[in-house]
Image (spheres, rainbow, N blue to C red):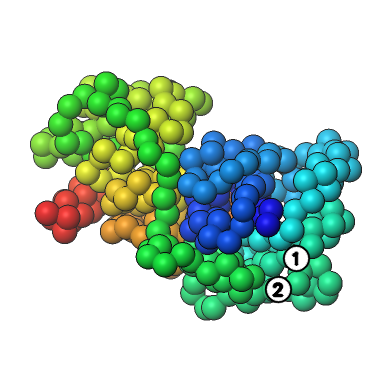
Amino acid sequence: MKALVVCLDGMTGVLLAGPAVRAVATRAHRVTLLCGPRGEAAARLLPDVDDVLVWEAPWVGPRPPTVDEADVEGFLQRLRDTAYDVALVCTPYGHSPLPAALLLRMAYVRHIGADSADDSGTLIDVPHRRLPGRHDAEAALDAAAALGFPPRAGDDGRLRVLPTPDTAGLTGNGPYVVLHPGAGTPARTWDAGRAAEAVALLADAGHRVVVTGGPGEADLTRRVSGDAAVDLGGRTDLRTLAGVLRAADVVVAGNTGPAHLAAATGTPVVSPFAPVVPAERRGPYGVDAVLLGDHGSPCAGTRARHCPVPGHPCLGEVTAQDVLRGVQKLLKSSG
């Protein structure tokens, strides 16, 4: 049986689909993960993925391509050539699987399942309606089970990634706390000045601090690190970053991909979490976590990329002291 798991979201969505991928792999002979460019690196870190198929859909992401640019016909031919037997479509809460399901049907995929709140007509063979309050990782697992792929015995359903490299050459020896100041959108980004204060406060409290960031965040990580932290901004690919996060005592990160990558390595997370997406559906999953911020803010549930409320109140009141207390709480609970 050739199975296709569709997750066109970015890093976060791909990592949250990981438990469902493992469930599909219990019965499928070969599992292909279809993702967008923003999720490819994470897809290649997931256990039980045999192939990764990358396609940028014209309805996903901050700057999606046009239908012509996406070469829909070419993409359909790629699917037809492989002749998948079954497909599971994983989507974030509030997003529709129907565009993907339509293309899968046009590509002659025989059996399609998805988590869907919409009337799917003939597009989805097994439409699953998620239970109230289910996390995206749990909802994907539920949809997989409804499609005939329950988790394998003994699988705890947590996020996982493949083994990571030893990163002591980057971080130095000894325990440390990671602070990842960036996020994919301004609405989910904690103030850089507050992040720099948190680094200094953590260092004053006796913690070694490592600051991480992507290739385009070197200026941000340099500012946040100051003279108190190891600055790894732009110095890690995703697999190396996973190694850095796995070896950390605690990771401080907003509601962004590296928070979920930390969870996938089993590391506790302190998260200044903007409620533009609900924490109960997209928060760090399967690890001890402290969520900071005003989750009753007027921006809650808006999925806004830029804060619609003057002053960014949901994160604006999160202080460096709040972060320190969160780190100390998680260190105490982990012994």
> Which one is in front in this view, the residue at disc 1 or the one at disc 2?
1
**What residue does disc 1 label?**
111
Whichever of callouts 1 and 2 sits on the residue coming sooner in the sequence is 1
Q: Quadrant of the C terminus?
A: bottom left
Asked which quadrant contains residue 147, the reply is: bottom right
Within-10-Å neighbours for mark 1: few <14, some 14–19, many 20+: some
Residue type at the position of mark 2: Val
Asked which quadrant contains residue 211, the reply is: top left
**What residue does disc 2 label?**
126
Residue type at the position of mark 1: His
Can residue 189 be spotted in the picture?
no
Please tell me how many numbered marks the rendered image carries: 2
Q: Are marks 1 and 2 in contact (CB under 8 Å)?
A: yes
From this view, report whether residue 308 is shown above or below residue 56: below
Residue at figure coordinates x 46%, y 33% from the top left = 238
* Viewer-nearest residue: 146 or 306: 146
Disc 1/disc 2 C-alpha distance (Å): 8 Å
State the image coordinates of residue 272 (x, y, percent, origin top left): 36, 51
Can residue 332 be spotted in the picture?
yes
Residue at figure coordinates x 35%, y 30% from the top left = 165
Residue at figure coordinates x 63%, y 65% from the top left = 94
